[in-house]
Amino acid sequence: MLPIRWRGTPTCLALLLLCLGASPSGAAVAAGRNLLPNPGFETALPGHPWMPASWDTFPSGLPTVFFGRDSSLFHGGQYAVSIANLSTSIPMFHNWSQTLLVGREAWGKDLAFSVWTRSNGLQGRAYILLQAYRDTITKMSRIWKVERLAAKERLGIGPLDDPLLSLGWDRRYFSENETEWVKREVRIFVPPSTNIIIVRCGIFGTGQVLFDDASLVSAPAAPSPPVPLHTNLLADPGFEGSGNDWEYSMAPYEGLLVERDTTVAHSGLASIRMEGGLSGPVSVRTGVCQLITNRNLSGKRLRLSGWIKCDSLQTDAWIAAYCTTLGGDVRAPTPIVFGGNKDWTLTSVDLDVPPATYMVSAWFLYSAPATGRLFFDDCSLEVLGPASYLETGEAPPKAPPLPTR
């Protein structure tokens, strides 16, 4: 049987790749007050030998990853939590997480998530992550105190009709091999209709990382910075740095690789290489992206571009951009698709950002699993000027209708 090809939006892909499990909380957002229950991991889950209350772990099922509550290395109090991972043959974002229900009291404000981290022999990347979703199924599963799948069935939502929408996302990667305790922070704007907030502390690599004294606080929304014309909005566009400015989107397929390559480059000393993952149940989008959460991008015309090189690639590779609105993700026009053998070639696509866009994601990707190798380098996202619909009077682009449930 041929593999099913996954052609959904990044929101749907996030649902496939991310685990949304945690204990419910209905805490109201109040400026300056820590919204996280058990932020220092001091309270144990009753009846469990090591699990802290109110927190959950990523259920990978792999014997090479170990979660624990540590009483010997801690920043404050008497406990911290840790993740130790021994293998990356199957790529997974192992993490501690906590999920909170929010309502109108959070809309239009910023949320800041901070946590103290300590690295012991880290090889790869660790991270903290703050996410905002409109996710009816998770919301009702928390209210009903049932598993997400049970809530989905009770709501009568079909397999392809999940109304989940990612509205805010900020991740801070760090890759120092050994550190003492370091405070790290991420921050997002909470758009209207958000009902789920998730905080995560995790590792994508090997070694051990500890986390302690987490905090999630509300604050007045900071103004979005202006967006200059003809300026690359992407950080580390040539992959010359550590790679920590980029999101890596990877299915848990054995041998799948997305990593910096210092032997092949269009310019400079490095590019990003993707290959492997020769078997998997479905064909999924794999690659790297950056998410620009700047509301001033609304009403602008953007150009996404990058240099691509293919080496015996037996699948499709392309670039893509999505604009997140309350009505769903608006996709840029379909660009040229690449494959086979192709020397460095510039590919680009122009798009008009709809009004009330909260986030723009720039993707450089291919369909995995597949044989062959793919490289991207010298990527760019720039503002060309006002959106064309503002000058022509035409209707702005809209997202396809979302499921109504």
Image: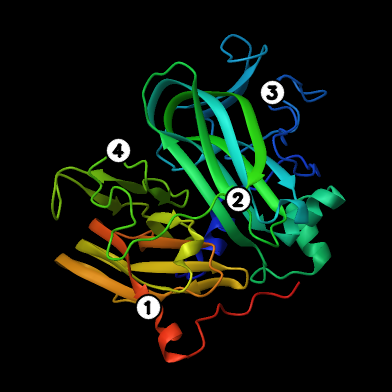
Residue 257 seen: yes
Q: Is residue 14 above or below residue 254?
A: below
Determine contact: label 3, label 2, CB under 8 Å. Answer: no
Point out the tag, 1 or 4, that comes first from the N-terminus: 4
| Residue 191 coordinates in the image, percent (x, y) | 64, 59
Above-or-below relation of 266 to 350: above
- Which residue does the numbered mark 1 point to in the structure image? 334
Local secondary structure at mark 2: loop
* Between marks 2 and 4 in the image, the one whose residue lies nearer the viewer: 2
The Cα atoms of the two marked residues, 3 and 4, are separated by 31 Å
For the residues marked 1 and 4, what is the alpha-carbon distance in whole angstroms? 30 Å
Residue of label 2: 221
Disc with the residue nearer the chain's start (3 vs 2): 3
Q: Amino acid at mark 2?
A: Ala
Dot 4: within a 10 Å radius of its alpha carbon, few (fewer than 14), some, or many (20 or more) residues?
Answer: some
Residue identified by numbered label 4: 242
**Which residue is denoted by mark 3 in the rendering?**
41
| Among the 4 quarters of the image, the one containing residue 292 | bottom left
Q: Amino acid at mark 1?
A: Thr
- Position of the C terminus, as image quadrant, is bottom right
Q: Residue at x 71, y 25 (%)?
A: 51
